[in-house]
Image: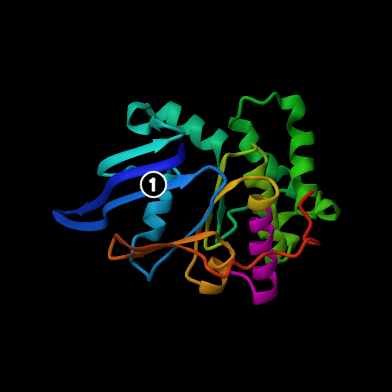
């Protein structure tokens, strides 16, 4: 069974009577444990699709099933619970609280979870250690390098043990060395931990770490293909 399935998804923005079709009949299926990259030029609809799949925005028409359930049948409180417990997010801009510590940033999703507060520190510490930042645990986010900030963002995405991780241009603000380190970590989360990964990127090199690339053009799928020569991370990349 597919973890994510969309059927004929449309997203239409209406601004003072002017309608813009961001997505036009997108149908995709993503199985549990897949690593899928979504590519396309600026304005192709890739970020809009991620926002809809991540329950950060609503679609205009069509059906979205998550774990076999039609999300159109859920109210906003139920949708928020699914988003927080089943989904993790990594964004290009990191979205950390600059004057909070690494540990405090990673704990944030737990505030809205069903996990008892007595376990929050332990869970957050484990997530921080898993991305190789134990030595930065009590540093402020503002004191970190760009690559370290993105590792914190990954730890935050992991802390609730989500089924799927959405990564929106996670290497976009990083130098090439830091960017490669981040995409290797993300691949390890897929290959070793079994997380489903949906990656938005404009970089072909980055997309080739995925198993499959979906390309969008003008709000429609232009191709959906397996990666022929997938880049595989060496075994010495951390993830514990």
Q: Name the residue under label 1.
A: 52
| Residue bounds of the magenta highlight | 171-188
In the image, 75: left or right of 138?
Answer: left
The residue sitting at 34% across, 60% down in the picture is 45
Q: Nearer the viewer, residue 94 or 158?
A: 158
Residue 101, magenta (yes or no): no
Q: Estimate the x, y position of residue 104 in percent, counting from the top left.
A: 72, 43
Residue 114 occupies which quadrant of the picture? top right
Asked if one can make out residue 143 in the rendered structure from this viewpoint, the answer is yes
Residue 178, magenta (yes or no): yes
Q: Estimate the x, y position of residue 44 in percent, counting from the top left.
A: 33, 65
In the image, 59: left or right of 183?
Answer: left
In the image, 91: left or right of 192?
Answer: left
Q: Which of 108 and 187 is in front in this view?
A: 187
Q: How is the image coloured?
A: rainbow
The residue sitting at 35% across, 44% down in the picture is 6
Q: Estimate the x, y position of residue 189 in percent, counting from the top left.
A: 66, 51
- The secondary structure that most of the magenta stretch takes on is helix
Residue 184 occupies which quadrant of the picture? bottom right
The residue sitting at 33% across, 42% down in the picture is 58
Looking at the image, the residue that sits furthest to the bottom is 176
Asked if one can make out residue 97 in the rendered structure from this viewpoint, the answer is no
Residue 118 occupies which quadrant of the picture? top right
Q: Estimate the x, y position of residue 227 in percent, counting from the top left.
A: 51, 65
């Amino acid at each position: 069974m597919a973890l994510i399935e969309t059927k004929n998804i449309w997203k239409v923005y209406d601004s003072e009577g002017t309608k813009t079709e961001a997505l036009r009949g997108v149908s995709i299926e993503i199985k549990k444990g897949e690593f899928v990259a979504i590519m396309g030029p600026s304005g192709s609809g890739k970020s809009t699709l991620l926002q809809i799949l991540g329950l950060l925005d609503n679609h205009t028409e069509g059906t979205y099933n998550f774990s076999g359930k039609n999300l159109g049948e859920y109210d906003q409180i139920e949708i928020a619970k699914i988003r927080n417990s089943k989904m993790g997010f990594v964004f290009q801009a990191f979205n950390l609280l600059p004057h909070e510590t690494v540990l405090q940033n990673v704990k944030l999703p737990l505030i809205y979870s069903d996990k008892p507060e007595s376990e929050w520190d332990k869970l957050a510490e484990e997530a921080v250690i898993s991305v190789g930042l134990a030595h930065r645990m009590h540093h402020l986010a503002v004191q970190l390098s760009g690559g370290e900030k993105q590792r914190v963002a990954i730890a935050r995405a992991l802390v609730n043990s989500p089924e799927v991780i959405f990564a929106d241009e996670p290497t976009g603000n990083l130098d090439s060395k830091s960017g490669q380190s981040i995409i290797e970590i993300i691949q390890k989360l897929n290959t070793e931990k079994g997380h489903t990964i949906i990656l938005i990127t404009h970089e072909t090199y980055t997309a080739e770490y995925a198993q499959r690339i979906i390309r969008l053009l003008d709000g429609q799928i232009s191709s959906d293909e397996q990666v022929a020569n997938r880049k595989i991370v060496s075994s010495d990349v951390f993830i514990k």
